[in-house]
Image (cartoon, grey):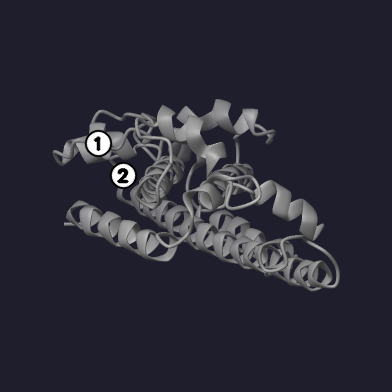
């Protein structure tokens, strides 16, 4: 039922982008002084699509990029995702960015108490991570829209517009990094709390949540050894930070330039 909704979501995304971008000159959509989509030619082609040389192809490129990033986020929130989907007859080949993680062979921990603790942990990971992704997307998007206004209306980014946009960015980014109740802190707290009662061997195990399969990825992200719920929280934050920024770069190819103009680095 959920997958049946994908097609209508894709159609809506394409229609919305087509309507909003169809009147713009394709040269402006692609140029470095416009939206900068010429910079997305290589990744769009690598994903099996076409270079974005029309509003429709821009929409298709954004859709493919977002679908891939969403798969990658899900694979980190549920390392056994491919195994679980296969168990219910879903064709995971249509989700090419959903990397194969752990595989418990269709078995679980076999103990009700341990299973309940794992279920709480899994729900915390998926719910809090999705909230984080939405929160970061919203905050950084608000910053980018303010900065784009300074570029496109006057043709050059200059004060005092940049001063106002920079203030908007600082306020938006602060919602991510604020100690205690920022978006990042809430994700860490939710995972640490939700997974604190689960035996960490079960969190790592292939018949548990399967995070042992992601230990090398967590290490590559610069985190501590994956040996506690707090270390897991740090790893999930870092991976989601990266994937959400890639998500945003696909729809706003000039993201890095704009963030530099706003003088408010992303966390």
- Residue contact at pointers 1 and 2, CB within 8 angstroms: no
Q: Residue at x 58, y 46 (%)?
A: 36
- Which residue in the structure is indicated by mark 2? 111
Residue 214, image x, y percentages: 50, 31
Foreground residue, 146 or 107? Answer: 146
Residue 9, image x, y percentages: 28, 59
* Left or right: 201, with 107 as reference point: right
Q: In the image, which disc is placed on residue 94?
A: 1
Residue 213, image x, y percentages: 46, 28
- What is the crowding at mark 1: few (fewer than 14 residues within 10 Å), some, or many (at least 20)? few
Res. 247 in view:
no
Q: Earlier in the sequence, mark 1 or mark 2?
A: 1
Foreground residue, 42 or 168? Answer: 42
Q: Residue at x 40, y 37 (%)?
A: 79
Q: Is residue 177 above or below residue 217?
A: below
- Provide the secondary structure element on which disc 2 rests: loop
- Provide the secondary structure element on which disc 1 rests: helix
* Left or right: 155, with 231 as reference point: right
Res. 241 in view:
yes
Q: Is residue 202 above or below residue 126?
A: above
Would you identify the image quadrant in which residue 126 lies?
bottom left
């Amino acid at each position: 039922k959920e997958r049946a909704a994908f097609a209508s979501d894709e159609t809506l995304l394409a229609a919305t982008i087509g309507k909003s971008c169809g009147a713009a000159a394709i040269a402006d959509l692609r140029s470095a002084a416009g939206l900068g989509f010429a910079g997305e030619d290589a990744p769009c082609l690598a994903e099996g699509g076409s270079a974005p040389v029309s509003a429709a192809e821009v929409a298709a490129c954004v859709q493919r990029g977002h679908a891939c990033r969403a798969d990658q986020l899900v694979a980190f929130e549920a390392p056994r995702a491919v195994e679980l989907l296969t168990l219910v007859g879903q064709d995971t080949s249509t989700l090419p960015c959903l990397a194969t993680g752990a595989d418990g062979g269709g078995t679980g921990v076999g103990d009700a108490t341990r299973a309940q603790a794992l279920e709480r942990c899994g729900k915390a990971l998926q719910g809090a991570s999705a909230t984080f992704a939405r929160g970061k997307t919203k905050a950084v998007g608000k910053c980018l829209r303010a900065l784009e206004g300074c570029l496109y209306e006057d043709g050059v980014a200059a004060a005092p517009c940049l001063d106002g946009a920079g203030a908007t960015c600082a306020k938006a980014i602060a919602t991510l990094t604020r100690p205690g109740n920022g978006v990042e802190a809430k994700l860490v707290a939710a995972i640490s709390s939700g997974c604190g009662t689960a035996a960490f061997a079960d969190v790592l195990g292939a018949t548990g949540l399967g995070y042992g399969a992601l230990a090398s990825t967590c290490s590559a992200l610069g985190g501590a050894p994956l040996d506690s719920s707090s270390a897991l929280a740090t790893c999930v934050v870092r991976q989601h930070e990266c994937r959400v920024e890639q998500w945003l770069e696909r729809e706003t190819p000039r993201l890095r330039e704009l963030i530099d103009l706003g003088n408010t680095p992303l966390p």
